[in-house]
Image (cartoon, rainbow, N blue to C red):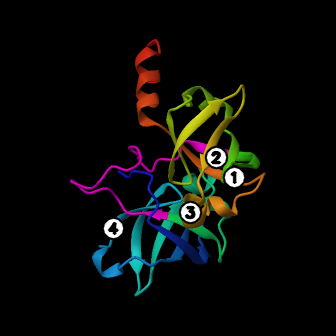
């Protein structure tokens, strides 16, 4: 479990293609001696397992399912990605409860200046739009964000300069694709009100 507060802007060092998966080697500022093999790390919001590590890097595998349902299938060497280590009991919950289970891929429609920050218009997959509410939470590329407004087929989020600097948001442009995880509360409310057939 995560909070959507990014703790490193890491770099994809290389991508090793496999038959049904890919192995990513990711260079990070994390102290790798404090990370066990098999540990979970959210990579652009997607919970991946550490399968190998070196002094300043770790490797994680992504299955074909993950490659198909997230932006990981388009990662290449040199790409910047957001990292977050899992929440520990007693840690500050600065964002919202994020599971690291990507629900779909959204697209940046527009980016505009908004009094010192930037306003991003995001187009979610159609089936996820109903889970987005004004002043609710959403995780985009692993970043916990508050939804400002919701339109018929899009929603807006505001990104302050600090977040632009320490996450991949400073590199996003119209047409960029981002991993989207809906708020788990919205998921369970929708399931509770859905008639059982």
Q: CA distance from mark 2 to mark 4?
A: 26 Å
Mark 4 or mark 1: which is in front? Answer: 1
Residue nearest the viewer, comparing 26 with 195: 26
Marks 2/1: CA distance?
6 Å
- Image height check: is 63 above or below 147? below
Q: Nearer the viewer, residue 146 or 154?
A: 146
Dot placed on the residue nearer the N-terminal end, 2 or 1:
2
Q: Is residue 92 magenta?
A: yes
- In what element is the residue under mark 3? loop
Q: CA distance from mark 1 to mark 3?
A: 15 Å
Would you identify the image quadrant in which residue 168 lies?
bottom right
Of circles 2 and 3, which is in front? Answer: 3
Q: Which residues are magenta?
A: 83-106
What separation in Å lies between label 2 and label 3 (alpha carbons)? 18 Å
> Within 10 Å of the Cα at label 1, are there few (<14), some (14-19), or many (20+) other Cα atoms?
many
Q: Nearer the viewer, mark 1 or mark 3?
A: 3
Mark 4 or mark 1, which has the lower sequence index? 4
The mark found on residue 38 in the picture is 4
**Which residue corresponds to mark 3?**
167
Q: Which residue is mark 2?
A: 105
Residues at marks 2 and 1 touching, judged by CB atoms closer than 8 Å: yes
Q: Which mark is residue 177?
A: 1
* Residue plotted at (78% across, 52% down): 174
């Amino acid at each position: 479990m995560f909070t959507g507060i990014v703790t490193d802007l890491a770099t994809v060092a290389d991508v090793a293609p496999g038959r049904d998966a890919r192995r990513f080697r990711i260079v990070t500022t994390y102290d790798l001696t404090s990370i066990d093999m098999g540990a979970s790390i959210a990579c652009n919001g997607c919970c991946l397992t550490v399968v190998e590590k070196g002094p300043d890097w770790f490797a994680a595998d992504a299955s074909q399912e993950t490659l198909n349902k997230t932006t990981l299938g388009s990662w290449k060497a040199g790409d910047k990605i957001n990292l977050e280590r899992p929440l520990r009991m007693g840690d500050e919950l600065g964002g919202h409860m994020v599971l690291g289970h990507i629900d779909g891929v959204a697209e940046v429609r527009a980016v505009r200046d908004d009094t010192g920050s930037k306003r991003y218009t995001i187009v979610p997959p159609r089936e996820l739009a109903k889970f987005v509410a004004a002043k609710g939470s959403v995780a985009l590329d692993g970043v916990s964000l508050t939804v400002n407004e919701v339109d018929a087929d899009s929603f807006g989020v505001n990104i302050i300069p600090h977040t632009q600097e320490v996450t991949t948001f400073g590199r996003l442009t119209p047409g960029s694709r981002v991993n989207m995880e809906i708020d788990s509360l919205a998921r369970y409310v929708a399931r509770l009100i859905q008639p059982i057939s």
